Amino acid sequence: MLSLRGRLGDLDGQRADEPELNMAPLIDMVFLLLIFFLVTTSFVREAGVEVARPQAASATAKTKGALVIALAVDGRIYIERRQVDLRSVRGLVERFLAEDPAGAVIIAADKNSLTGRTIEVLDQCRLAGAKDVAVAAQRPGP
């Protein structure tokens, strides 16, 4: 037979010492990790359209937060997954720079798009006050 004494302690109402699992340090550690990853993550605002980027041997990766402006083959402009007009590019870039003054603007133009259209988008970004404007490219494969 099983003894109630070993399981519940003495019969006079006292319980035996049982180990406790304190969850507070574990929860604190999870919150600290969450905050760490949120602070160290750089957010890139996607353009919303796939473009075939031209290749460049000098292409480097941008690590800080950036606004990506995509320019399709037919001249359509996409910012944050929606198509925009050339006249609204300046206002959207100004709004982005108001939120993140150190942010960069990346123009991801398709390699078959017109150079004139890329220059027009670049001009609107410069007029909006963007100091760090780059044209996206990819490194050639081996």
Image (cartoon, rainbow, N blue to C red):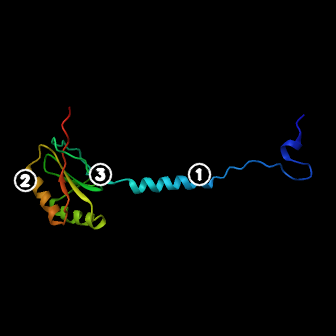
Marks 3/1: CA distance?
31 Å
> Does 140 sit above or below residue 134?
above
Q: Secondary structure at mark 1?
A: helix
Label 2: how many residues lie within 10 Å, few (<14), some (14-19) or many (20+)? few
Q: Are marks 1 and 2 in contact (CB under 8 Å)?
A: no
Residue mark closest to the camera, 2 vs 3: 3
Residue 63 — which label?
A: 3
The amino acid pointed to by label 1 is Leu
Marks 1/2: CA distance?
57 Å
Counting residues from the N terminus, which is met first, the one under dot 2 or under dot 3?
Answer: 3
Residue 116 — which label?
A: 2
Q: Are marks 2 and 3 in contact (CB under 8 Å)?
A: no
> Residue 52: horizontal and vertical position, in percent?
18, 41
Q: Secondary structure at mark 2?
A: helix
Give the residue furthest to the left.
116
> Residue 75: horizontal and vertical position, in percent?
13, 50
> Residue 108: horizontal and vertical position, in percent?
19, 49
Residue at horizontal 60%, vertical 54%?
25
Between 139 and 48, the one lying in front of the other is 139
Left or right side of 58 for 19: right
Residue 26 — which label?
A: 1
Counting residues from the N terminus, which is met first, the one under dot 1 or under dot 2?
Answer: 1
Left or right side of 110 for 104: right
Residue at horizontal 18%, vertical 53%?
134
The amino acid pointed to by label 2 is Gly
The amino acid pointed to by label 3 is Thr
Between 115 and 64, the one lying in front of the other is 64
Residue 9 — which label?
A: none
Residue mark closest to the camera, 1 vs 2: 1
Left or right side of 42 for 61: left
Label 1: how many residues lie within 10 Å, few (<14), some (14-19) or many (20+)? few
The number of numbered badges drawn on the structure is 3
